Image (tube, rainbow, N blue to C red):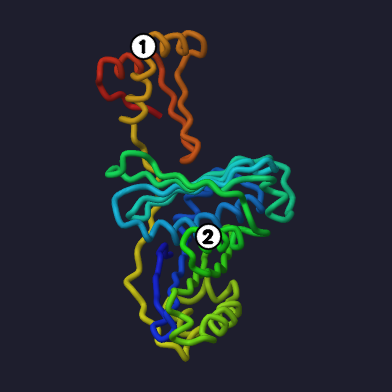
Amino acid sequence: MSNYVQRFLLENLDIRGAIVHLDTVWQQMLAGRHYPQPVAQLLGEISVTTLFLGDNLKQNGRLTIQLKGEGPVSLLVVDCTDDLHLRGMAKCAQDIIPQPVPDLLGHGQLVMSLDIPAMREIYQSIVPLDGNDVAQIFEHYFKQSEQLPSRLFLITTEQSVSGLLLQKLPTADERDPDGWTRVEALASTVHDQMLFDLSAEDILIHLFHEEIIRIFDSQPVNYGCHEDPAKIYAMLRSLGREEIDSILQEFGAVIVNDEICNREYRLDALAIDAIFREAGPTIH
């Protein structure tokens, strides 16, 4: 089992890239969700792409990627921290059949948010969804935002997800005018079994054996959902005792749904009393 981001550089070509592989983290993200297969595939591909972007964070913070649409998949959200703790979710109809990504998402938007404590405001970029699949959508984004031609190869199963990213640096054509075309063609020969069965180093050597490859230290990825009762308590206190008591009276309990982590917090009257006495009740 392995969950990592592995960056590399084709030194003689000035082409950089990364490989992502997730298995246990991906399985944790899917646990209890029961997404239709096309939705799970979208979520897996966006998870990989978010890690390609999140691994570049230079400061403490959180990167959130959202794909919002008017199709049967109305929302996909994945976020990761600078230390690569990943979580994600989807909102969708349950009777979805395989169909092109533009039909699944409808006329939608790609929303990228960067929350860094040192910044006064959250940075947000919103662009139309432009592409026939997730790879094309983000290739277009990379070209527009970073001015770097990019290629993405993304693979999802129920057990694991993998991806290969290539980016052409500005000096690449000076080093080798045919280098990008050659590397694109070599990368396109990657196949599902290769990405799942080989290590990142073996994949790179297999694909680019005639190139000089600098392989950087791999970065571990962890599942980003953990219980944080303090945030739940603070949110309830901010609503005020009167508002919370009215909910208790109507429903008999206060229920807080953490959708992105697929967790429900249920608090009875005794737990609410403890919260407003600033004690820490046990919630379940």
**100 or 201, which lies in front?**
100
Q: Are marks 2 and 1 in contact (CB under 8 Å)?
A: no
The residue to which callout 2 is attached is 144
Image: 82 above or below 154: above
Residue at figure coordinates x 31%, y 57% from the top left: 58
Q: Is residue 78 left or right of residue 92?
A: left
Residue 171 image point, x, y percent: 42, 78
Q: Is residue 22 left or right of residue 93?
A: left
Q: Is residue 96 left or right of residue 163?
A: right
Q: CA distance from mark 2 to mark 1?
A: 49 Å
Residue 45 image point, x, y percent: 56, 58
Callout 2 crowding tier (Cα within 10 Å): few <14, some 14–19, many ≥20:
few
Quadrant (top left/top right/bottom left/bottom right) for the C terminus: top left
Type of residue at label 1?
A: Arg
Residue at figure coordinates x 55%, y 70% from the top left: 151
Q: Which mark is residue 193?
A: none
Callout 1 crowding tier (Cα within 10 Å): few <14, some 14–19, many ≥20:
some
| Earlier-in-chain disc, 2 versus 1 | 2
Type of residue at label 2?
A: Gln
Residue at figure coordinates x 60%, y 77% from the top left: 188
Q: Secondary structure at mark 2?
A: helix
The residue to which callout 1 is attached is 241
Residue 11 image point, x, y percent: 39, 83
Image: 167 above or below 77: below
Residue at figure coordinates x 35%, y 69% from the top left: 218
Q: Secondary structure at mark 1?
A: helix
Image: 119 above or below 136: above
